[in-house]
Image (cartoon, rainbow, N blue to C red):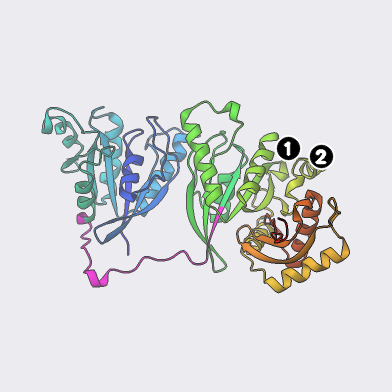
Amino acid sequence: MTPVIALVGRPNVGKSTLFNRFTRSRDAIVADFAGLTRDRHYGTGRLGRRAFIAIDTGGFEPQAGEGSIYREMARQTRQAVAEADVVIFLVDVRAGLSAQDHEIAEYLRQLGKPCVLGANKAEGLRGGESNLAEFYELGLGEVLPLSAAHGRGVRAVLEAALDALGVEEPPEDEDAPEEGEGGLIRLAVAGRPNVGKSTLINAWLGEERLVAFDLPGTTRDAITVPFEREGQKFELIDTAGLRRKGKVFEAVEKFSVVKTLQAIESANVVLLLLDATQGVTDQDAHIAGFIVESGRAVALAVNKWDAVDYYQREILRRSVDMRLAFMQFARLHFISAQKRQGLRPLWASLTQAYQAAMRRLPTPQLTRVLHEAVQFQQPRRSGMYRPKLRYAHQGGMNPPIVVVHGNSLDGITDTYRRYLEGRFRRAFNLEGTPLRVQLKTSANPYAP
């Protein structure tokens, strides 16, 4: 089994920076800001031929008060430690030893798991070993100095963690090939802050995997969670809530917005979550527009449906039809993530949207549908000539692209292009995915 390493420590000691070093990625947001990480963040790494799984955690406060977000963060950290084979306890050598470090050390000693003590931010410090002396009173053995930001001492800490488990480097001929991504669906859940994205993913997983708290902006990073349902493997991506541009002031929140937009672009399917208690806002329409521009398959879900009365529901239905008219190809669901109502039909729509986005469209069938469309409704004459549509073929998937060839296609109006799009949608059941129709005009050899 691949060993699991959990990174634990109080806020702002450099856990996410070390996590990015271990995984050789930028998956975790890093900033000089305490309490930035809140959920468990998983990643894979490799030291030589020894593979491992790293877990980044939020700042650990074992004695956090009930009802606070720090209590939820501490619960996530405890779960990460329970899953881990070895713990790397990170302290800040510049800030020195604190009472909170003592509390964390006491908690780790009681568990009896292998633990490596790393003193981060040790770059450029004078005094050498004397700076580390006070950390020996934590009773966790040798203190290893490192600088996660500069990459110094990182290998020594990682080797100490793997050696504590007795993980040996496999022979070269036994090194297993890495697993591919065949059949994996990347599903991103997007929406405004506090619409219930983390609550929904927790309901799907059946556990408190993500911090769900009644506070806008609880999720700050794009958290990826593996999930399997009815034999289909998914990668669930919980994203940070997107607010209006004028309301984004903190640099940390700007990073969160970038990570969310990247998650949407890299996903196969996006679930746009709306809040029934607040209706469809301008920001919801902006997020929907970005999803369509990115070409992602999409489904719509209105959360907190149980919290509104009949009149509000009717107003909300009309608001969706008017403000999100450009997403009529996406299925709409009314759910309650907290009460786990309406989730099964939602899965069917998400799967259907993915299948539609990846559908192969044979050239003979596309051309037949094109000719039937022209026979039913010809394009308007443009100048002296009427556009002639000859044949069509598929130009790409996710989203599906239909390339139509013919003569004088510059005169095709947007209205007729939408008409063709509707014919192709109905013929191939392309529900839940944007469809792009591209027109290519043949060159006239007699033009000169």
Which residue is nearer to you in this view: 433 or 30? 433
From the viewer's perspective, tell me whether residue 419 is left or right of residue 171.
Answer: right
Q: Position of residue 147 (x, y in %)?
A: 24, 37
Tally of numbered discs: 2
**Magenta includes 172?**
yes
Work out which residue is located at the far front of the displayed protein and give it: 448
- Three-letter amino acid code of the residue under disc 2: Ile
Q: Residue at x 51, y 52 (%)?
A: 207
Instruction: Specify the quadrant of the image occupied by residue 131.
Output: top left
Where is the C terminus found, in terms of image quarters? bottom right
Tell which of 409 and 87 is nearer to you: 409
Looking at the image, which residue is at 33% across and 40% down?
17
Name the amino acid, label 1: Gly
Is residue 116 in view?
Answer: yes
Task: Evaluate whether residue 338 shows in this view.
Answer: no
> Residue 216 appears at what percent x and percent y?
57, 33
In percent of width and height, residue 50 lies at 26, 60
Question: Can you tell which quarter of the image residue 283 is in?
Answer: top right
What is the magenta range?
A: 163-187
Q: CA distance from mark 2 to mark 1?
A: 8 Å
Q: Name the secondary structure under disc 1.
A: loop
Q: Residue at x 22, y 31 (%)?
A: 93
The outermost residue toward the right is 376
Q: Is residue 447 left or right of residue 103?
A: right
Q: Secondary structure at mark 2?
A: helix
Dominant SS of magenta comes to: loop
Pointer 2 and pointer 1: residues touching (CB < 8 Å)? yes
Say few, some or many: other residues with alpha carbon within 10 Å of mark 1 (under 14 / 14 to 19 / 20 or more). Answer: some
Image quadrant where one finds the N terminus? bottom left
Residue indicated by mark 1: 279
Q: Which residue is mark 2?
A: 315
